[in-house]
Amino acid sequence: MTDGIAVNQALILLIPVSVTVIALYVWCALALGAVFAKSGEPHWKAWVPFVNLAALLVLGGIPGWWVLLLLLPGLGALIVAVLVIVAAHRVNLSFGYGGGMTVLAALLFPVWATVLGFGSARWIGREGRRRRGAEPDATGFGAPETLVTASAPPPPPAPPAVSPFAP
């Protein structure tokens, strides 16, 4: 009789937790799919469990095979979590955001992905993070004013002046 009660109590606890985990996964997949679409990655990569982490790492300039560290018990998950935060920081720079968004990515990852994916952020690209020749600061990244802004090409040279008088 007590085994039946314990199973019922476990199911009562398991169902809301499962629904919450599935809802968070769908939310992250939708938001990451939008981030991937803005950055030129295929949208479907956001829905495949370990491929989404690898694609995020690649967007951040980190080799995707580092996801395999999750196979190491304990320390592997911690290393991958740090790598995801570093990749999120680099993706933020590619979208034109700074360190505050990195903190958001570290604490509330679904919210971070939603802001980048469904917000007004535009993908600048890895090449557009810093101007060429800009010196990095102590953290290894360029100062905020070194972000590249869109500028018009230089105007064409003026035609040579023609004298209205004949020689």
Image (tube, rainbow, N blue to C red):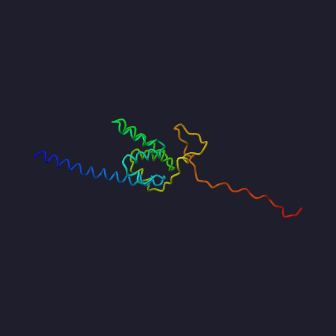
Q: Is residue 132 left or right of residue 41?
A: right
Provide residue 147's location: percent of width, then percent of height. Answer: 56, 47
129 versus 158 height, above or below? above
Residue sticking out furthest to the right: 167
Q: Quadrant of residue 137?
A: top right
Q: Residue furthest left?
A: 1
Give the residue displayed 84% in from the left and 61% down from the top.
Answer: 163
* Horizontal and vertical percent position of residue 72: 35, 36
User: 156 left or right of 23?
Assistant: right
Quadrant of the drawing holding the C terminus: bottom right
Residue visible at 40% across and 41% down in the picture: 67
- Expressed as whole percent of the image width and height from the top left, the position of residue 112 reads 42, 50
Task: Tell me where residue 47 appears, x and y as whole percent.
Answer: 38, 52
Q: Is residue 161 above or below residue 21?
A: below
Q: How many marks?
A: 0
Name the residue located 59 percent from the left edge and 42 percent from the top edge. Answer: 134
Tell me the residue at 53%/37% (across/down): 138
Q: Nearer the viewer, residue 115 or 23?
A: 23
